[in-house]
Amino acid sequence: MFLVTGATGFVGSAVVALLHDRGHAVRAVVRDPARADVLPDGVERVAADLADGEALVRAMDGCESVFHLAAAVGAPGPEAHELNVGGTARVVDAVRRAGVRRLVHTSTSAAICVPDPDGPGCVIDEDAAGGTELTDPYSTTKAEAEAVVLDAVGAGGIDAVVATVVNVYGPSPRGPLSYNQLLAAAARGAVGAIVDTRVGWVLAEDVAEGQLLVHDGGETGRRHVLCGEVASFPEVLDTYCVAAGSPHRVRALPEGSELPEGAPPFADRSVVYGRIGGYRVRDDRARALGFAPRGIAEGLALTARWMPAT
């Protein structure tokens, strides 16, 4: 039995769908029953909250592994810290107490943006010491959460691996959320300008595949970066517009620029990454597991075909 936190979210629902399709028994942690309709028939639902450690222990009873994907994105500092750091600490404690064999902790490239020793900007390095140059609540609290997991491994309490995810887009059972919102806004002409900085992009379906690979063969106490391709925000948005048959294109602003008020969701991440000069990726460990994600041209074409039907 595999337990998944964040099971009704954008990436979590894709992970649940893949595990279920592969024939695994899945138990989904559900905080809001109204969102559970996204889960496939046959997936067990269990009510639990990351604020309730005892409920997490009960939810993990009889589970072989836990995929921890629940996280607060875009929340203010105290809320982000409570869920991302406090919630992860309670998951780690519950894993230990319930005797779970393996934890797959989902982290983010934002948690390990460190200065690139070989050039300008930053690098997302599977072997980085930890910490991030980014200062927004999501990035800093996800960095702290990752440290909680790795410290627990170092103390010998649990067997855990880290799946580090870059910017996620594409088809998901939850619908067109996350960076899909920014792609859709660009296609309807609602993104006048975006900061021209390079970051990683990956399909939600490929993240789900990568999660299972990391679970099955990932190295204990190590990061495994799940990235499809590194590309600039303007390149991604314009490529999507072409794939979607939209005449709109975005105006590229230099790194360090700010966006006007009222920019669509996730456009501000181009500002955040632009302040550090973007990043490149080192993902050899994930690739060695057989992770073979699709690039942006294929991924955005797939997303354009799926988006109108959602």
Image (spheres, helix red, strand yellow):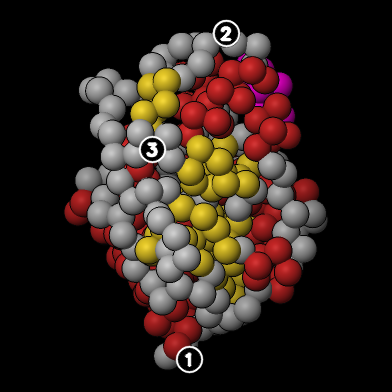
Marks 1 and 3, Cα distance to the nearest angstrom? 39 Å
Residue corresponding to mark 3 = 270
**Res. 27 mark:** none
For image coordinates 47% across by 65% down, the residue present is 118
- Which three-letter amino acid code belongs to the residue tagged 1? Gly
Precedes in sequence: disc 3 or disc 2:
2
Residue corresponding to mark 1 = 156
Q: Nearer the viewer, residue 8 or 275?
A: 275
- Which three-letter amino acid code belongs to the residue tagged 2? Pro
Residue 194: x and y in percent read 39, 28
Q: Are marks 1 and 2 in contact (CB under 8 Å)?
A: no
- In the image, the segment drawn in magenta is 302-310
Marks 3 and 2, Cα distance to the nearest angstrom? 22 Å
Residue corresponding to mark 2 = 247
Callout 1: 10 Å neighbours few (<14), some, many (20+)? Answer: few
Q: Is residue 284 magenta?
A: no
In this picture, is 187 found above or below 89? above
Secondary structure character of the magenta stretch overall: helix
Marks 1 and 2, Cα distance to the nearest angstrom? 56 Å
